[in-house]
Amino acid sequence: MENNGIPSVLMADDDEEDCMLASDALKESGKEVEFACVEDGVHLMDYLLEHSGSWPNGLPDLILLDLNMPRKDGREALLEIMPNPVLKRIPIVILTTSKEERDIAFTMNAGAKSFITKPGTFNEWIEIMRSLVQTWLK
Amino acid sequence: MMKEGVKSRSYPLMALFITIAIGIGISGYGYYRLQKAHITRHAFEELSTISELKAHELSGWRKERLGDGEVIAKNRSIADEVKRLIADSSTARATQSMLTWMESLKDSYDYHEVLLVDPDGTIRLPASQKGKLEKGVLEYLDESVKAKAPLLNRFYNSKKDGAVRLDLIAPIFDWDSESRPVIAFLVLEIDPYNFLFPFIQKWPTPSKSAETYLVSRDGNEVTYLNELRHRKDTALKLRFSLSSSNKEPVAAMAVQGKEGVVEGIDYRGVPVLAFLGAIPESPWFIVSKVDISEAFAPIRDSAKLIVLMAGLMVALAAAGIGFFGSHQRTQLYREQARMLENARIELDLKVNERTAELLKANKQLQDQADLLNLAHDAILVRSIDDRVKFWSKGASETYGFTMKEAMGRITHELLQTVFPQPQAGIRDQVIRLGRWQGEVIHTNALGEKVIVDSRWALQTDSDGKPSGFLEINRDITARKRAEEYLKANMERLELINQELQEFAFVASHDLQEPLRKIQTFCDLTITRCSSSIDDTSQEYLERVINSALRMRQLLDDLLQFSRIAARPKPFEKRDLGLIVKEAAQVFEHQIKETGSRIEIDELPKMEVDEGQMLRLFQNLIGNALKFHSDLAPVIRVSAECERDRYCEIFVEDNGIGFEQQYSELIFRPFQRLHGRSKYEGTGMGLAICRKIVERHGGTIRAESEPEKGSKFIVRLPVEHDLEAA
């Protein structure tokens, strides 16, 4: 949550286009939400850890986590976030191309709140964002 | 058998013999007793006869002597002569005639000496004997006077010459006087040795020990009067006192008045049979005795004879019985010899029979050995201490050692056996359970390693004790190598598969990405830019989207297909009915909309990969719903099982069906029977079904007719061996 009271969403995904789709879909969701995208797990952790001291300031209200990223993928990042007493309070939703059972199981066990496979149509993107906003950004 | 027969026959014989022997013994003894009594009586009789005879004779002799005396005493003319002599002793003529007469007395009556003696004992005539009478005579003169009769004195030792003397004392009376006094004595000396002693001692019958002697009693002493047979110089010299010893000689008994036959001991202490008697009117006792040993010698002889006779008889009896027995035995032997001969003949026959049998058996064994030698496998027989007793041809071929080389060797040394578990443990197991099987590494004659499947069996002897081992080894070296090769290959294959798997996954995933983008951005264009694109553009974009979607589906299917065999989950027993129901549930919405009906019969429990079964039935049911006819789809799932080994599951529909000629084609990947526009689908569904079914070790086939619906038959094993996975 930023100081200005507007909820923020932080997305970690190495795919620019998906970041763009997510951002656009979020805009269509109806709520004013701040959105940022980092390209890999390293950047994600850096940012989170940097701001973890000023909780809740500077920290996002929702993290959208892709699993397959270079340098540090989502699975690793998840495992680093969860033990952290401050960071673990942030709801994490996995947003990935994977449909694998094992990924679902892993992330749910690790503490992710939801697992969403990236949709094929834009309408679906909007639906997803709306639902996420409703669930996690109230 | 022979000995028994003889024994049983000899018992009664023995009994008979014993009886006879006892009989002989008893009668022998009886006879002996008889003989003894007889002999004893005879001895007694002889003794008594002889003794009485002697006694009688002695008594007679005394009487004679006394008679002699009487004659002299009563001879008046002699008396006158004597008187005259006494009156005038110097008359030579009277003296001479007296002497002559005395001399004649000596000669006629056999006296040793005749003496004319004064009453006081002085010797008158012969002149050579002048002197006093000896004491032994003297003391009797008074007695003769008293008795007025002649008498005999007792034996005495003459002082003159030491000899034993006996005298007859005849008184000479004065007949002219009324009182008839004794005027002189005539003493006639008797030399007992002349007649008396010899007479006494003489024994009428030949005897070694018999004798007679006289004894007399002087106070408490007993004197032997004559010479004894068994001791010299005893006359009047041997004497003993009566109370001296506890064992008195028979002489003592005699002097104490015992008469008749007695048994006792003599002066030597030797047991004797004696006849005792008193010589009447004399101090003499007569003892006739004979050694008991002599007296009863006949008894002993008799006894010996009896024993000899008895012995002889017994011997005879024994011989007789023995002979009889021997005869019997001979009979028995003969009989038994005969039996033996029969038995021998029988035995011969049997032996021949048995030999024939043995030869036959041997031939059989040989044939069996030959058979064993036909086998390729190495067949060994080992003794209990692991030495080779049989080495088949197969063994020679397998190991390269000839039978000669192998026989007697310790197998695990010969073959340098490497056992899969400690050898002692294997041995124990075989001995305990009778069997063992395992893979063992041997080294052949060339030094090469041979892997064998070795099966051992325990040999036991008739008592059930272990006696050896039968070992049958199959050379599996080639197989093992093949197995290893296969294993290596399979591992490689697995690796490749896994790599392929990962590749497929990654490929699929990475290929999916751009497709998704195509899909999404086309979609975005359509939705966001609808105002600036015309319908045609929109249509074209939609086609792009469809293509992208199809490719994504294809990639998914491909990924699924590639996964079916590669990522094996272990089979678990599952209720197929539940799986099919779950599969149908996916189509719940569709079923409701189309008014379809799915009937699911009782389905068996089978060992399956649940996820794959789900996929299988989803595909089948999906197809059945997809390829429906004008009728509302009715799908029936049923099963038939044979003997709990295999089950066939039927998925029937009333859809459009297809031509039976395509029933195999439809299972090929990417195969479609209809155009894409009519029925969607990638053509992978049934290929996936077949892959799944094949992985389960089963088969899938289809039966159909156009317009008549389709029937898919899935045949699966109920259970899987461990190897199938």
Image (cartoon, coloured by chain):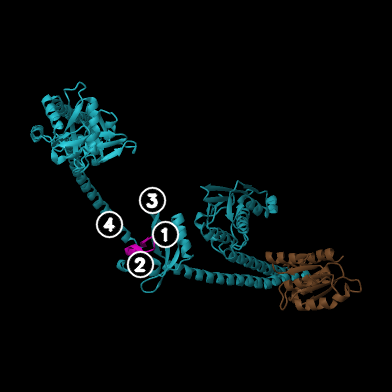
- Range covered by the magenta-colored residues: B377-397
In which image quadrant can residue B102 be found? Answer: top left
**Callout 1 crowding tier (Cα within 10 Å): few <14, some 14–19, many ≥20:** many
SS under mark 2: loop
Q: Give x and y (percent) for residue B509.
A: 66, 71
Give the number of the disc on residue B409. 2
Which dot, 4 or 2, sits closer to the camera?
2
Query: Circle 4 marks a residue in which chain?
Result: B
A58 w.r.t. B433: above or below: below
Q: Is residue B669 left or right of residue B16?
A: right
SS under mark 1: strand
In which image quadrant can residue B546 be found? Answer: bottom right
Who comes first in sequence, dot 2 or dot 3?
2
Give the number of the disc on residue B456. 1
What whole-number distance in Å separates the C-alpha atoms at marks 4 and 3?
26 Å
What whole-number distance in Å separates the C-alpha atoms at marks 3 and 1?
20 Å
Q: Is residue B495 left or right of residue B302?
A: right
Query: Chain B in the picture: what colour?
Result: cyan
**In the rendered image, which residue does mark 4 sit on?**
B366
B687 w.r.t. A14: above or below: above
**In the rendered image, which residue does mark 3 sit on?**
B463
What whole-number distance in Å separates the C-alpha atoms at marks 2 and 1?
18 Å
* Tag 3 near tag 1, CB within 8 Å: no
* Tag 4 near tag 2, CB within 8 Å: no
Residue drawn at x 81%, y 67% is A91
Q: Give x and y (percent) for residue B310.
A: 19, 35
Which dot, 4 or 3, sits closer to the camera?
3
**Callout 4 crowding tier (Cα within 10 Å): few <14, some 14–19, many ≥20:** few
Q: Give x and y (percent) for residue B402.
A: 31, 68
